[in-house]
Image (tube, rainbow, N blue to C red):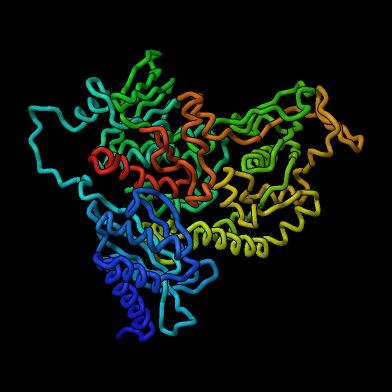
Amino acid sequence: MLDSHIVNVRNEVDNWLLSFNEAISDKDNKKDSIENLNKLFFENCHWRDILALTWQIQTTSGKQHIIPKLYDKVLDVAARDFTIDPQRTQPREVIRAGKNVIEVILKFKTKFGHCEGVVRLYEDLKVPRMFKAWSFLTALSDLNSSFNKKDDEYENTLEGPNWLDVRTENRLYKDRDPEVLVVGSGQAGLSIAARLKQQNIDTLVIDKNERVGDNWRNRYHSLKLHNQTHVNHLPYMPFPPTWPTYIPKDKLAGWFEYYAESMELNVWTKTTFISAEYDEAEKNWKVILRLSDGNERILKPKHIVMAVGVSSVPNRNKIPGMEGYKGKVIHSTDYSSGRDYKGKNVLVYGTGTSAHDVAQDLYVHGANVKIVQRSPSMVVNVEPSAQLPYQLYKEGPNTDDCDLITISTPLDVLKKTHQLLTQKTKEIDKPLLDKLEEVGFRLEYGEENTGWQFKYLTRGGGYYFNVGASDLIANEKIKVIQFSDISNFNPSGIEMKSGENFEIDLMVTATGYKGQEYVVEKFFGKSVVEKIGPIWGFDNNRQELRNMWMQTKQPGLWFHAGSLAQCRIFSKFLALQIKAIKEGILN
């Protein structure tokens, strides 16, 4: 027998959905429909649409802005039959951004396909027993024309090419151009290629590296992922349950290689993207590639997906005054191991993730390490604090449901969520943070105390998940120096304003990476950069990341990047848009 409380929750959800469906089905009386919809939403509410009703990824806030737009868009795409999805996590009471709500996973249809959504309700204290929506997500799940692979019938191939023959020939592109060219074979490139493959869209991935996975394989020796395995699955192929909680970089690299082969992705390694020019008349690109044998090849895809990542081109800007130092200087991206620096003096410039990881690796290998801090940084213990944003993935819902719930959180609510999480991490990590400040390490917690995830979403770094380096700094085993305390760089090291001199055998500059605009200008020209505008960081009007996973102002040019989870989630929506364009649904 069902708990009466569960029954009551379900009744409130059913009542809200009944009223919502009645309001949007009254097509003859817009005024009444809008009035009825108004009764179902709080004044301070949010609607995030991901392709389902607007063919955009955008968030609208405030009931006065949402209701007329929502009503019109529902009619435009003939949205109907909003119901609880019986196959998904059932309605439940949860806390989101400090608020007690009923969270409901929905399904519905439009004239274009099947959709999913999430609505969060709570009781209006001014109108007892009246539950209203606080946040509302509508997302496209599948197009009516989506390609669904059927089971193949057994074919006798004794006299013809077998599967391997067909695969080998298919990946050569001898007599055709790919519809989509993906640049980069990291998590972004592989995830979008796999999604496009399942939509039956001919896709080629290129990478300058020797092997798939080298974007991880070639990083420094001791690297592991800093978030847990269950958050990081790629589309269609989750990691085995036997895998370690934090994946070593070489294990992940090997999985990427296996993934590309298992998903039958066409990948050309040791292939350099030289340039691309868009043909307005033909509606395709002319792309020049340099192949592994040194020859050039011209391809004419309709779409290019730049999947080179948020952090792909090292920022090798000179540190002020550093030209006075005549010793060895490398960027952190060129660092592999500290095994050759036992007993040597090494200066690591920077206090982000790479700087901390390099400094710790050097210390473990017996180097005398000093780390230079130029501006305050955020430090979060990898456990439990850094894992708090991913608690949803441990609550019980499967990965698909967790992904949907995750993207249903609008920007304003997400900020509030991370302000609360940041406050909690400061309390949990207080002993470490106090010791860091005692030794002169300067701390900060992001804009408006929104923490590390917003630092990643706005600038791509500026924080560190402590896996040991912060403890070494707090215990003064790795010395911290403030850049403002350095008097000058001399040929053999640095001179401090205090009069101390430090001899340096190696300097590692962990000065971050250039923005994606740099890559666009290099390959496509300055005019394309000016046309599309900034990439990454938030557009305050749309409340979404700029130029990510959406059509840009340059036809046929797309951007896909982010964490493994972001790549898994948003590759689906990018692929659906390219499919919709192919089918003539979307311009």
Residue 342, x across and y down, in percent: 71, 33
List the single residue furthest toward the right.
Answer: 499
Does residue 84 appear in this view? no
Q: Quadrant of the N terminus?
A: bottom left
Residue at 37% over, 13% down = 295
- Is 566 rendered above or below residue 581? below
151 sits left or right of 421 in the view = left
Q: Nearer the viewer, residue 166 or 585?
A: 585
245 sits left or right of 12 in the view = right
Residue 530, x across and y down, in percent: 51, 31
Residue 38, x across and y down, in percent: 40, 70
Residue at 45% over, 57% down = 60
- Is 128 rendered above or below residue 262? below
364 sits left or right of 138 in the view = right
Q: Quadrant of the C terminus?
A: top left
Residue at 55% over, 70% down = 98
Q: Quadrant of residue 251?
A: top left
Q: Nearer the viewer, residue 249 or 177?
A: 177
Residue 498, x across and y down, in percent: 91, 38
Q: Nearer the viewer, residue 551 or 366?
A: 551
- Is 177 rendered above or below residue 457? above
List the single residue furthest toward the top.
Answer: 295
Q: Nearer the viewer, residue 491 or 484?
A: 484
Does residue 256 appear in this view? yes
- How many numbered circles does the render carry? 0
